Amino acid sequence: MKFSPMLKPAQLVSRYKRFLADVITPDGEALTLHCANTGAMTGCAVPGDRVWYSTSDNRKRRYPYSWELTETTGGQWIGVNTLRANQLVGEALRAGVIAELAGYDQLTAEVRYGVENSRIDWLLAAENRADCYIEVKSVTLLQQDSGYFPDAVTLRGQKHLRELQAMAELGHRAVLFFAVLHSGITRVAPARHIDPHYADLVLQAQRNGVEIICYGAQLSPDGMWLDHTLPLFI
């Protein structure tokens, strides 16, 4: 994924109301950015860190600037726009980067499925193969060298695990895909210390046929892309 034009830098003042952040540009201009991230963003929104933002030409948007990346004082890069995770996985699937999910010729986004009125992020299909349901989660919570999901209790995430498990029990492939958008993360785990019920459901789902795949990304103001696997520990 290329950012065109390239992202612009600013210094973070504060994030507030979940979806807004105030920043100061290198020229001293105060801007308000839209923040497409509903999580706690622990460690991703420290006042004083450098942020990188994109600009929309959609005149209907109240806030034309979008917070895309955080560059921490320690030199780590974090993709804070959670909408990008699905896009990155879609690009990687089309390019054949994710070897575990190769061999399908149909790729569809946001397909309704399940008994709890859900939408799957990506559905893969091919003749003479079981359909593959992929739920994407963006991982940005770093503690020591490990990445954790979720960063807050997630009832929605719990629902998705139940739905994936049901698909696996019906004979389909079901995949929980952790897109790791933090350069400091070297392995991934469910955040039992934050949402123990979610962690229990991950273990249950895995035992009942749900596959768990973790990929890390390269992140920069020029672009971002998934390019390497990361280990999972439960």
Image: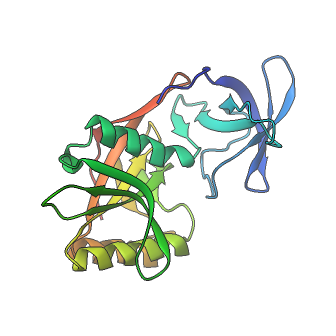
User: Nearest the camera: 195 or 117?
Assistant: 117
Rendering coords of residue 42 (x, y %): 60, 52
Location of the C terminus (image quadrant) = bottom left
Q: Residue at x 68, y 23 (%)?
A: 8
Q: Residue at x 46, y 49 (%)?
A: 86
Disc tally is 0
Q: Is residue 47 above or below residue 57?
A: below
Q: Residue at x 44, y 39 (%)?
A: 184
Q: Specify whether residue 32 is in view.
A: yes
Left or right of 130? Residue 43 is right
Rendering coords of residue 195 (x, y %): 49, 72
Q: Is residue 10 above or below residue 139?
A: above
Q: Residue at x 42, y 46 (%)?
A: 180
- Which residue sits furthest right? 29
Rendering coords of residue 167 (x, y %): 29, 75
Left or right of 81? Residue 48 is right
- Which residue sits furthest bottom? 115
User: Nearest the camera: 129 or 214?
Assistant: 129
Quarter of the image for residue 229 reads top left
Quarter of the image for residue 190 reads bottom left
Q: Specify whether residue 186 is in view.
A: no
Q: Is residue 10 above or below residue 203?
A: above
Left or right of 111? Residue 43 is right
Q: Is residue 148 above or below residue 158?
A: above
Rendering coords of residue 217 (x, y %): 40, 36
- Which residue sits furthest top? 27
